[in-house]
Image: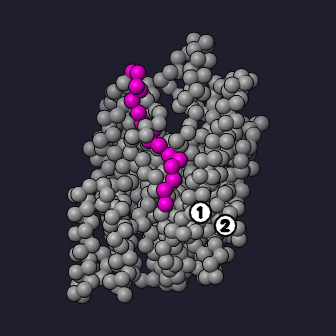
């Protein structure tokens, strides 16, 4: 049984998928598989790190959803419209030994201060350890920024989910969605870096799905992880949950039974929606309108839809199409989650291990001395060190890796290759926020003259390896803890 349990993590399909990146990784993955197989056959160990089978218990799960739109409007500019409603969603899990909470928020970010208040209250009143919380804002750019007015609503959502726990099963699966694209390209005319769709750039299309159901098979909740910036409706200057909101609404309506669908914001530091008019005509219109006022914004980007003439019929049409694009891409993402849920999930498990761990890493920092959004090298001086918080939440064979900033997709893909767990995902801007604009490029990307790289407070040479190795250390920690 121990051998079969371990092989289920390293099945041949998983090895084939994870080793397609190159022969070096293929040899590494096959070597790890053979080593584990040998240890299992000869009794020297059954799981990673030479431990016995993880301490498991019978799974119970509950989910809840709370509308937070009015809380957003209470802090918005008077007259702010609502394009679509915003929610806090939660899943609480229990295995008879400990508990965990997965919380998805239609918010741009959650400050570390507010995360701390919520996690401490959750630990104190609900018995859920703070390091077994994944608090995951979607990073929508549409009038849903962090403030303390959400704290009580978020806590109440977690508490409601905890009250509704019932015996449950968990299933994992993966699919692919084509609604994201690498957003760093060189201009075909000038040859300079700028934001725009780079169809040849690295872009992870993987949709990771975690499904929780009652023992009769009726759905309780789904968590899905995908790498895309929810920035489409930011131009509207209205409240909107953007692509993840449309996807979650579609999934919930389709599943029925009051099921809740949680979005986990993947490694999207360099990933935009594949159709995003801000990088096309709307950008050109804004540049031209500002130029009439004697202002050059060609190498900058005013926030939201600032400066757009909404009385211009062409602008009005493009903004209406923006609404349709957000909804359409949300439906496409949601449909892929549903396809995986219908036919691609692995066998259900009703006995699972739960554990969490956190650690901090520190890298040398820098301060930018010049300006300009993109296209030219930046000038820097040494700055204060940059601290990042990593978290690992283990739910059965799912390793949910959280980081409190935005990282480029290649860092997450490297972790997935090197992780001993097939179902390893990365959730960014999770459990707090390291600071505004703190993008973490992969090492090779520090040569790009893009706005994420130019404005990163991190010096090259540290972040990628420190993040990946830090996550691998946390995986080992939760694996070892669950095995004792």
Numbered range of the magenta stretch: 175-190
Image point (36%, 83%), residue name:
4
Marks 2/1: CA–CA distance:
8 Å
User: Any magenta on residue 421?
Assistant: no
Specify the quadrant that holds the C terminus: bottom left
* Relative depth, front residue between 433 and 143: 143
Mark 2 highlights which residue?
Answer: 255
* Sequence-first tag of 2 and 1: 2
Q: Position of residue 117 (x, y in %)?
A: 57, 59
Q: Position of residue 231 (x, y in %)?
A: 57, 41
* Mark 2 and mark 1 residues within 8 Å of each other at the beta carbon: yes
Specify the quadrant that holds the N terminus: bottom left
* Relative depth, front residue between 399 and 434: 399
Q: Secondary structure at mark 2?
A: helix
Query: Does residue 177 lie above or below 212 as drawn?
Result: above
Horizontal placement of 70 versus 159: left or right? right
* Relative depth, front residue between 401 and 191: 191
């Amino acid at each position: 049984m121990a051998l079969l349990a371990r092989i289920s993590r390293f099945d041949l399909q998983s090895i084939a998928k994870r080793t397609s990146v190159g022969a070096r990784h293929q040899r590494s993955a096959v070597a790890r598989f053979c080593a584990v197989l040998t240890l299992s056959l000869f009794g020297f160990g059954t799981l990673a790190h030479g431990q016995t089978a993880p301490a498991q218990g019978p799974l119970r799960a509950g989910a809840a959803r709370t509308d937070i739109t009015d809380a957003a409007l209470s802090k918005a500019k008077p007259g702010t419209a609502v394009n679509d409603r915003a929610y806090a969603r939660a899943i609480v899990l229990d295995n008879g030994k400990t508990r965990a909470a997965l919380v998805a928020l239609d918010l741009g970010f959650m400050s570390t201060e507010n995360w701390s208040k919520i996690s401490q209250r959750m630990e104190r009143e609900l018995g859920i350890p703070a390091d077994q919380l994944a608090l995951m804002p979607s990073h929508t750019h549409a009038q849903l920024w962090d403030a303390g007015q959400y704290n009580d609503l978020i806590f109440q959502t977690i508490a409601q989910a905890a009250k509704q726990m019932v015996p449950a099963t968990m299933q994992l699966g993966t699919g692919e969605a084509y609604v994201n694209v690498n957003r760093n390209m060189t201009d075909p005319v000038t040859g300079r870096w700028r934001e725009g769709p780079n169809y040849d750039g690295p872009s992870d299309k993987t949709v990771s799905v975690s499904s929780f159901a009652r023992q009769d098979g009726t759905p309780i909740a789904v968590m899905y992880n995908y790498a895309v910036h929810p920035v489409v409706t930011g131009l509207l200057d209205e409240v909107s949950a953007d692509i993840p909101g449309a996807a979650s609404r579609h999934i919930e309506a389709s599943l029925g039974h009051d099921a809740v669908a949680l979005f986990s914001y993947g490694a999207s530091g360099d990933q935009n929606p594949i159709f995003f008019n801000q990088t096309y005509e709307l950008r050109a219109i804004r540049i031209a309108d500002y130029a009439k006022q004697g202002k050059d914004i060609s190498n900058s980007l005013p926030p939201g839809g600032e400066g757009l003439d909404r009385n211009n019929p062409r602008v009005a049409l493009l903004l209406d199409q923006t609404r349709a694009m957000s909804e359409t891409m949300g439906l496409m993402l949601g449909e892929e989650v549903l396809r995986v849920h219908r036919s691609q999930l692995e066998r259900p498990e009703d006995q699972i291990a739960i554990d969490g761990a956190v650690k901090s890493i520190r890298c040398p920092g820098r301060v930018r001395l010049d300006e300009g959004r993109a296209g030219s090298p930046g000038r820097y001086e040494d700055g204060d060190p940059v601290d990042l918080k990593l978290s690992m939440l283990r739910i059965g064979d799912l390793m949910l890796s959280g980081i409190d900033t935005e990282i480029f997709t290649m860092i997450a893909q490297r972790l997935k290759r090197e992780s001993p767990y097939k179902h390893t995902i990365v959730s960014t801007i999770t459990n707090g926020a390291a600071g505004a604009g703190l993008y973490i490029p992969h090492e090779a990307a520090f040569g790009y003259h893009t706005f994420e790289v130019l404005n990163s407070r991190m010096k090259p040479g540290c972040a990628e390896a420190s993040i990946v190795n830090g996550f691998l250390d946390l995986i080992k920690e939760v694996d070892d803890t669950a095995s004792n």
